[in-house]
Structure formats: C-alpha cells, structure tokens
Amino acid sequence: MAQPFNQAIIRLPAVQARTGLSRSEIYRREAIGQFPSRVRLGARSVGWVLPEIQDWIESRIRESRERGVA
C-alpha cells in the first residue's frame, strides 16, 4: 500500500517568512551545508521541501535552548 503524501514544496518567499533569513543568507547556508538543499522545479524555479525546513527550524530552537539562549 502506498504511503500518504505528506510533503509540500515551498518557494523562497515562504522559506524567508518561516525562517526569518534573507535570500542571500539562505543560499549562503545552503552552499556550506547548513541549510536544506533546494529542489529544482523547472528551468528557472526552485523550492524547498517543507518538512526539511520545519526540521531545520526545530533544530535551531533545540540548539538555542541547549545553549541557554532565549
């Protein structure tokens, strides 16, 4: 039986809104392996997998709490 599809791809403005990061910071962190990789959607469009962005946000929160930074 097939697994239910529970992933969505979101575009850059939504990634920026969710993370609070600028476009250049998203691409910089992606280039050095500190942010989820984008998915090519077409010749001139990309997006990010929503659960991967959510996981990245949750990991930032955990790290912040472990360091005691509010």
Image (cartoon, rainbow, N blue to C red):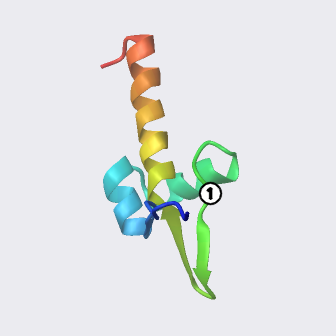
Q: Residue at x 40, y 59 (%)?
A: 15
Q: Picture coordinates of residue 19 (x, y %)? A: 38, 48
Q: Residue furthest bottom?
A: 43
User: Is 7 situated above or below 64?
Assistant: below
Position of residue 46 in the picture relative to residue 11 (left or right): right
Quadrant holding the C terminus: top left
4 to the left or right of 33 = left
Image coords of residue 24 (percent x, y)? 52, 58
Report the residue marked by disc 1. 37
Would you say 26 lies left or right of 68 here? right
Q: In the rendered structure, which amino acid carries the disc numbered 1?
A: Ser
Quarter residue 61 falls in: top left
Q: Which of the two residues, 67 or 59, is positioned nearer the viewer here?
A: 59
Q: Residue at x 36, y 17 (%)?
A: 69
Please tell me how many numbered marks the rendered image carries.
1
Say which quadrant the N terminus sits in.
Answer: bottom right
